[in-house]
Image (cartoon, rainbow, N blue to C red):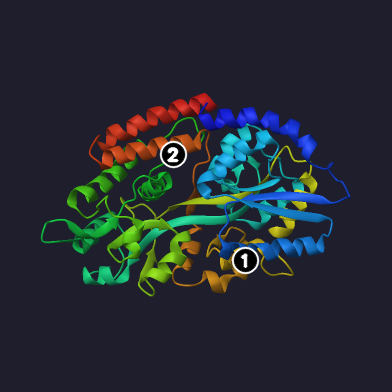
């Protein structure tokens, strides 16, 4: 059991004890306070979010919503450690990869039947899968992100490419031609950006390439990982080859792409707002390049609203979330409006995608929306976050020439299978 799991498990009991002292009885008709925790603290975001909360309070005068916000890097810690002091929120917005630890530690309240039915009816199967664990839906899917090839149109044209690469061979060729070096031999313009030091920045693009190479991350029954099989080794070798050729330089960052110094990378749709400001009319989006005749696929991850099991306001919490995520007068849900107008994000609810089609139909966002038809949910497996971090470190070891791709993935698989076995 990892540190997070042990901490969550120990705090779950404490939270149930203190929770009884900090909340009004379930179903109380008196004043109700709902504490909502998110990582949305930016003033521009709050300017859109707070009026939504205010509208619900206007319609439900007995309810007061207290919004608490922490930085993303602190969100998991706040959810798992804040409970011991009796400060557990009633509702929290969280990354779906944390579900296995939350569920195994009994932190989440099971949604009512009508909520589950609404989710299964109103969301794509991949979004339902991304909000489920152990065949149970745990909350309302909200923001959905997929990965696509993002490229600088100007730099590809200068490299002699009239269209983005569709295969690994084409990507390798274009990346090489788009790479430039100074008189001292140092790379001044990278053909392709690989991000180091960030688990999602390493593993999510790698997984998208793996699936677009007919590979699998984990067995269907979650009994063992499969990312160290031949397709995974080929995927890692492909990235290593880009580095060895100089087409990818690990010293470049996302800021370098925004500054027009990188031709291509694989990244999620949430980056769109920043790129539109930095490179107006010069950013293109295309499907993940494929290898070996595979179909292009990509990784999808979700965020979702969940309710803390220790709350005494579960009924009111789910009532609020149903309103927040439900279509209003045949139009977008309040959540859908917030995601599209404040975050430039893709809402998971299908009717929200339709209601906000004008915002989701621009040249940058539309390819990501289209990719939802063939995307695959990030594997929500026991020890998911631990395994992801292990895989990140081993892929990076291959990048830096410390291990061969095969040895690196075998090392990651051995540790991942140990974690899977421990947590089953």
Image quarter of residue 286: bottom left
Camera sees residue 351: no
Q: Is residue 347 above or below residue 422?
A: below
Count all numbered tags in the image, as a single digit.
Answer: 2
Image-based side of 24 in relation to 183, left or right: right
**Which residue is the site of mark 1?**
47
Image-based side of 228 in relation to 372, left or right: left
Residue 227: mark: none
Q: Cβ–Cβ below 8 Å for labels 2 and 1?
A: no
- The residue lying furthest to the right in this view is 29
Image-based side of 367 in relation to 89, left or right: left
Crowd band around label 2 with a 10 angstrom C-alpha radius: few (<14), some (14–19), many (20+): some
- Choose the circle earlier in sequence order: 2 or 1: 1
Q: Residue at x 71, y 41 (%)?
A: 110
- Percent of width and height locating residue 386: 46, 34
Q: Nearer the viewer, mark 2 or mark 1?
A: 1
Q: Label 2's element?
A: helix
- The residue lying furthest to the front in this view is 85
Q: Label 1's element?
A: helix
- Percent of width and height locating residue 262: 28, 62
Q: Residue at x 65, y 61 (%)?
A: 335
- Percent of width and height locating residue 50: 67, 62
**Which residue is the site of mark 2?**
388
Crowd band around label 1 with a 10 angstrom C-alpha radius: few (<14), some (14–19), many (20+): few
Camera sees residue 307: yes
Q: Is residue 195 above or below residue 55?
A: above
Image-based side of 361 in relation to 320, left or right: left
As measured in the structure, the alpha-carbon distance from the residue carrying label 2 to the one carrying label 1 is 34 Å
Q: Quadrant of the C terminus?
A: top right
- Percent of width and height locating residue 247: 22, 55
């Amino acid at each position: 059991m990892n540190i997070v799991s042990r901490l969550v498990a120990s705090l779950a009991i404490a939270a149930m004890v203190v929770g009884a002292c900090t909340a009004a009885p379930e179903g109380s008709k008196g004043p109700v306070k709902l504490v909502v925790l998110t990582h949305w603290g930016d003033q521009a975001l709050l300017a859109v979010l707070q009026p939504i909360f205010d509208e619900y309070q206007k319609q439900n005068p007995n309810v007061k919503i207290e919004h608490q916000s922490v930085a993303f890097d602190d969100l998991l810690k706040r959810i798992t450690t804040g409970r011991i002091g009796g400060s557990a929120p009633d509702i929290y917005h969280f990354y779906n990869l944390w579900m296995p630890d939350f569920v195994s530690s009994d932190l989440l309240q099971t949604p009512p039947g009508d909520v589950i039915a609404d989710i299964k009816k109103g969301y794509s199967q991949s979004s339902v899968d991304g909000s489920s664990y152990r065949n149970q839906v745990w909350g309302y899917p909200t923001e959905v992100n997929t990965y696509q090839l993002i490229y600088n149109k100007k730099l590809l044209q200068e490299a002699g490419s009239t269209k983005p690469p569709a295969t690994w061979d084409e990507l390798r060729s274009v990346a090489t031609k788009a790479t430039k070096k100074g008189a001292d031999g140092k790379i001044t313009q990278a053909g392709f950006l690989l991000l180091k030091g960030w688990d999602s920045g390493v593993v999510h693009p790698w997984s998208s390439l793996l699936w677009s190479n007919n590979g699998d991350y984990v067995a269907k029954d979650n009994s063992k990982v499969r990312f160290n099989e031949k397709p995974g080794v080929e995927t890692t070798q492909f990235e290593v080859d880009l580095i060895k050729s100089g087409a990818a330089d690990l010293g470049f960052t996302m800021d370098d792409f925004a500054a027009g110094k990188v031709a291509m990378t694989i990244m999620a749709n949430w980056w769109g707002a920043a790129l539109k400001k930095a490179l107006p009319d010069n950013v293109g989006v295309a499907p993940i390049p494929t290898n070996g005749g595979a179909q292009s696929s990509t990784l999808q991850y979700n965020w979702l609203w969940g309710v803390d099991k220790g709350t005494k306001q579960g009924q009111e919490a789910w009532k609020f979330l149903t309103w927040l995520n439900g279509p209003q007068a045949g139009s977008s849900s309040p959540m859908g409006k917030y995601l599209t107008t404040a975050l430039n994000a893709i809402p998971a609810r299908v009717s929200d995608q339709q209601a906000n089609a004008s915002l989701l139909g621009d040249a940058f966002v539309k390819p990501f929306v289209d990719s939802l038809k063939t995307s695959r949910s990030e594997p929500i497996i026991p020890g998911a976050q631990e395994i992801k971090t292990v895989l990140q470190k081993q892929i990076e070891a291959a990048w830096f020439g410390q291990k061969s791709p095969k040895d690196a993935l075998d090392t990651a698989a051995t540790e991942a299978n140990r974690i899977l076995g421990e947590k089953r």
